[in-house]
Image (tube, rainbow, N blue to C red):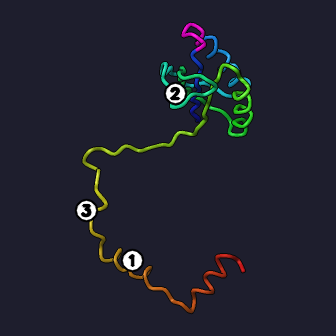
Amino acid sequence: MYELLYIVPTHFTEKDLPEVAKKINKIIEENGGKIIKEKNLGNKKLAYPIKQVYRGFYILLNLEIDSKQIDKLNKELKLTPEVLRHLITKPIKRTLKKRGERKSSLSEKPSASEKKGLEKDKKIDLKNLGEKIDNLFNI
């Protein structure tokens, strides 16, 4: 599952957006992708002008596509004149905890066994240090 956010410049009107979206959807489907969800985020001001364009329509797509096809899709979207900029990302899965399950790691003190583990990590045997470094670098 991937997310595609693309910006359509404002010289296209809101009436033109469905046709632009059809063209982008066709490009995605030609590359073996399947659109799950499409959301128009509206007309927003860009952080900086791009090709003398100051505003654009932001459109967010959730899609399923083979990871091998991402590069090809990127190239085709770069060549599409209706797309000012685009970004394809893989969304991060976040687990939400219930209210009662939240615990602050700063307020909890480590247990006795955790303290021993921390103390072991602090002690360094200088004789074996050289061997360990050699092993890390496979010398």
Q: Quadrant of residue 98?
A: top left
Q: Which is more N-terminal, label 3 or label 2?
A: 2
Where residue 77 appears, x then y in whole percent?
69, 27
Q: Which is more N-terminal, label 1 or label 2?
A: 2
Mark 2 and mark 3: Cα distance apart in space: 42 Å
Q: Amino acid at mark 2?
A: Leu
Instruction: State the residue lying farthest toward the front.
Output: 52
Depth order, front residue of 123/115: 123
Instruction: State the residue lying farthest toward the bottom.
Output: 127
Depth order, front residue of 97/20: 20
Q: Please identify the dominant SS of the magenta region.
A: loop
Q: Which residues are magenta?
A: 11-17
Q: Amino acid at mark 3?
A: Ser
Q: To which residue does mark 1 refer?
A: 118
Magenta segment includes 14: yes
Give me the residue at 49% from left, 24% from top: 45
Where residue 115 appears, x then y in whole percent?
34, 77
Q: Quadrant of residue 134?
A: bottom right
Q: To which residue does mark 2 refer?
A: 46
Query: Is the C-beta separation of discs 3 and 1 under 8 Å?
Result: no
Q: Amino acid at mark 1?
A: Leu
Q: Secondary structure at mark 1?
A: helix
Residue 30 appears left or right of 118: right
Residue 102 appears left or right of 117: left
Give me the residue at 59% from left, 29% from top: 63
Where residue 51 appears, x then y in whole percent?
64, 25
Circle number at residue 12: none
Q: Secondary structure at mark 2?
A: strand
Q: To which residue does mark 3 refer?
A: 107
